[in-house]
Amino acid sequence: MNVRDFKISEYRASELIGKIARTVYYLHSYGICHRDLKPENIIMTDSSDQADLRILDFGLSKIIGPEDKMFEPFGTLHYAAPELLLGTPYDKTVDLWSIGILSYVFITGCLPYTLFTKINY
């Protein structure tokens, strides 16, 4: 499943993922968990190859304490950490899973997991 028909170098992908990781680290230092990191929630500042990025859509984000856990099953299926989908308590590390999925998407242009459903007629 192609997310988008785009090609970026591994070097550029590493730059973008580094910026996303530093931004998420900053958010987490203030107790903010985004919970919905995905390409649709990242915007580039312009159309050049040197454009900076911005993370958008904090509608599902939550402010939590260092030892707090969350229980709400929020996020986008293809980018959500397993603990979110299993309904087990989770913390800010769910954003790190999403960064891993974003890394894969930036390098390959595809999602790492395709979810199949069997339809019985």
Image (spheres, grey):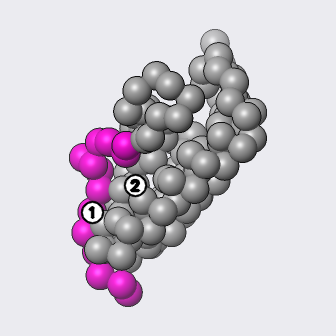
Amino acid under disc 2: Arg
Query: Does the residue at mark 1 contact the one at mark 2 (Cβ under 8 Å)?
Result: yes
Write the residue at 48% across / 63% down.
Answer: 22
Write the residue at 43% across / 61% down.
Answer: 24
Main SS class of the magenta portion in the image: loop
Q: Which residue is mark 1?
A: 62
Q: Nearer the viewer, residue 42 or 12?
A: 12
Q: Pinpoint residue 75: horizontal percent, then vertical percent.
A: 42, 47
Q: Is residue 61 left or right of residue 5?
A: left
Say which quadrant the N terminus sits in: top right
Amino acid under disc 1: Lys
| Image position of 60 with respect to 76: above or below | below
Q: Pinpoint residue 52: horizontal percent, then vertical percent.
A: 44, 40
Q: Pinpoint residue 3: horizontal percent, then vertical percent.
A: 60, 25
Q: Is residue 31 left or right of residue 101?
A: left
- Please provide the residue range marked out in magenta: 54-67
Residue 119 in sight in this render: no
Crowd band around label 2 with a 10 angstrom C-alpha radius: few (<14), some (14–19), many (20+): many
Crowd band around label 1 with a 10 angstrom C-alpha radius: few (<14), some (14–19), many (20+): few
User: Residue 109 has which mark?
Assistant: none
